[in-house]
Structures are given as structure tokens and as C-alpha cells.
Amino acid sequence: MHCFEHRDRPAVGVCRACGKAVCADCVAADCPGIACASGTCAERVRGIDRMLDLNLRLMPRTERLAASAERMSSTTARIQATMSGAGRAVYLLNYVIGLATFVGGAVVVWKGIAWEIPLIAMLGGLLALIGAALTIVGARAGRAYRAAESTHSEGADA
Ligand SMILES: [Zn+2]
Ligand SMILES: [Zn+2]
């Protein structure tokens, strides 16, 4: 292989920027690897080396960023799961308390417990009403929760 400029001289290597063969006279000094002394090749090769250095220095930071992003998304998923669990507990509690209150109130009224004391009978009726309302609210919340959960899991599957 001979120099691209001096066809009679042997080449010492190939320029990293343009790929042409260069002789000892045509090779740039203080350049990482082989580059043409004339033109912009040496500057371009130095630029390539600076980019590689920067990439190498940034790599650990990039990896740390990726790792923290992954941690954040897993934390978000955990919080979502916890919130979803709390939502289930709230509507179940609502439902159970509502039913218990309704049954308790209904029993007080139906059994005629202390009909002689109208206040307690009224309280029983009120309890039954509140219980029915709570039960309906709980059942609605449960239906909404299950609907949201099913669309959520469908989204996750897709
Ligand atoms: Zn040459
Ligand atoms: Zn070159």
C-alpha cells in the first residue's frame, strides 16, 4: 500500500477520518491514531476521540439515570397497587358496615323492640335507612372499582 498523495512512498497507515492511505510525511502529529496532516482530517479524528471520551465518562451517569427511572416506575407501581388495595378495603368496609347497620336497624323496628319508647324505634328506622344508603354506596363503589380494575388490567395486557 502506498500514500494517496505520494504514489511512490509506502503508507504508514490509513486515515481514521477519510480512509485514505498516508505516508510518514502526510500523517498528522499529536493525533490519536492515524490521520491526514492536510485538510480537516486530524481535527475530525480529535473530535471523534473527544466524543468517545465524553460517552465513556457519561456512561455511568446514564446507567444511574436508567436505574433510578426503573426504581421510580416500580415505586409508582407499588403505590398504585397499595392504593388499589385501600380502595377495595374502603368499599368492602362501607358495604359491610352498611349491611350491618341496615340489618340492626331493621331488627330494632321489626321486633318492635321498645316500641314503647318511640325514640329507639325511630333510631332503628334511621339506622336502617343509613345502612341501606351505605350498602348502595358501597355496592356502587365496588362496581366502579372492579370496572376500573378490569380496564386497568386490559390496558396492562395490551
Ligand atoms: Zn504522503
Ligand atoms: Zn484523511
Image: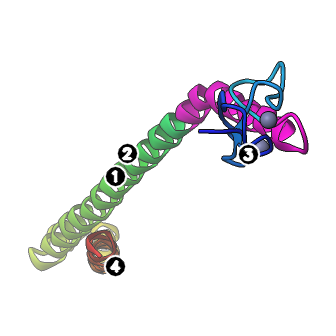
For label 1, the SS is helix
**Label 4 CB less than 8 angstroms from ligand 2:** no
What residue did someone put label 4 on? Answer: 144
**Counting residues from the N terminus, which is met first, the one under dot 4 or under dot 2?**
2
The answer to whether the residues at label 4 and label 2 have Cβ atoms under 8 Å apart is: no
| Furthest residue in direction front, as rendered | 8
Type of residue at label 2?
Arg
Q: Is residue 57 left or right of residue 89?
A: right
For label 3, the SS is loop
In which quadrant of this rendering is ligand 2 seen?
Answer: top right
Seen at 17% across and 70% down, the residue is 108
Q: Which residues are magenta?
A: 36-65
What residue did someone put label 1 on? Answer: 81
Residues packed near mark 3 inside 10 Å, few (<14), some (14 to 19) or many (20 plus)? some
What residue did someone put label 2 on? Answer: 78
Type of residue at label 1?
Ala
Seen at 48% across and 35% down, the residue is 67
**Counting residues from the N terminus, which is met first, the one under dot 3 or under dot 2?**
3
Nearer the observer, disc 3 or disc 1?
3
Give how far apart the Cα atoms at labels 3 and 1 are: 67 Å
Type of residue at label 4?
Ala
Which mark is drawn over residue 4? 3
Nearer the observer, disc 1 or disc 4?
1
Q: Is residue 83 left or right of residue 62?
A: left
For label 2, the SS is helix
Nearer the observer, disc 4 or disc 2?
2
Percent position (x, y) of residue 76?
46, 48
